[in-house]
Amino acid sequence: MVEEIEAGKIALIEVTPENIGDEHICCAIGNDRVNRARAEEKKEWLRERFPRGHRFLKGDLRGKVFIEFSPAEESVFPVEAPGYALIQCFWVSGRYKGHGLGRRLYDECERLCREEGYRGIVSLAGAKKKPFMVDRAVLLHFGFRICDRADPWYELAVRKFDESAPDPRFWDSARRGRLEGRRGLDFFYSPCCPFNRDFTFMMADAAREMGFTARVTELRNREDLAVLPTPWALFSLYLDGELLSAEIMTIPKFRELLHRIGEGKGG
């Protein structure tokens, strides 16, 4: 365990174009070939995004202690929030939880956003706690409120600096909830997560081996989001047009799910 006094001494640093080559980033922390490749792919994505105002703050350590955010107009989520910043990912996990690092990361994020003149900060959350989303309870504790909802359990939380600013909202296209006229499996993923590409294609290949039709759509640019019938753009999986999962899975877990559905249903 990390002693509280040690955690209190952990510095927060910002990953920038100047230091990204040397810094550990986010979740791909293994030093094996696969995780090094995933981390480098994430770094390439960040290099593309830095000129658009994307920012990445982390603990000065090798662990999942980070927050990343961008202008909402440049974000990877179908959210209309002009003048706001949008939190993309916010993680403190493992032995670093419970030492106030999340509070420090958020406070630094808010300080920078106020300094840059944003009208406030928005973040997606779930009405039910989801392990892959920012915890709704944490956001409410930090002074956010829920300003929009979309089926089946997506919520949009806002922390306004300018109370006269309009409430952010999900795009209308993200409220459709289903894909009309589709049979089989439809995978949507954003490369902003270092695990998404590998797991999406492994899952799609496993589905095809079991007789399912599987289509994969990468959401790399903001205009790509118009095809997405849900607010959650990091990863979404549809079966016959209906939401099946919003979380990547290990292949054994995914195969078990497809077996329960019934082999060949999506073929």
Image: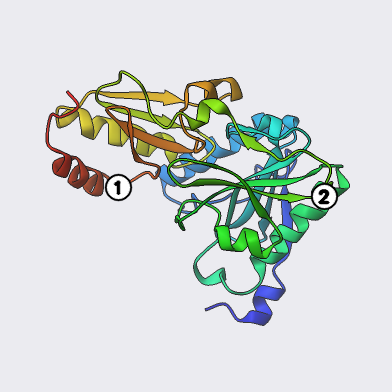
Nearest the viewer among 117 and 20 is 117
Counting every numbered tag in the picture gives: 2
Image-based side of 242 in relation to 89, left or right: left
Nearest the viewer among 114 and 66 is 114
Please report whichever mark, 1 or 2, sits nearer to the chain's N-terminal start. 2
Residue under pointer 1: 250
Nearest the viewer among 225 and 23 is 225
Q: How crowded is mark 2: few (under 14 residues within 10 Å), some or many (20 or more)?
A: some
Q: Are marks 1 and 2 in contact (CB under 8 Å)?
A: no
Percent position of residue 32, x then y? 42, 49
Percent position of residue 149, x then y? 55, 43
Disc 1 to disc 2, C-alpha distance:
41 Å
Q: Residues within 10 Å of mark 1 (few under 14, many from 20)?
A: few
Nearest the viewer among 227 and 191 is 227
**Residue type highlighted by circle 2:** Phe
259 lies above or below 95: above
Image-based side of 148 in relation to 161, left or right: left
Image-based side of 113 in relation to 263, left or right: right
Residue under pointer 2: 161
Q: At x 65% / y 29%, what residue is drawn?
A: 48
Q: At x 38% / y 29%, what residue is drawn?
A: 178
Percent position of residue 211, x then y? 14, 27
In front: label 1 or label 2: 2
220 lies above or below 42: above
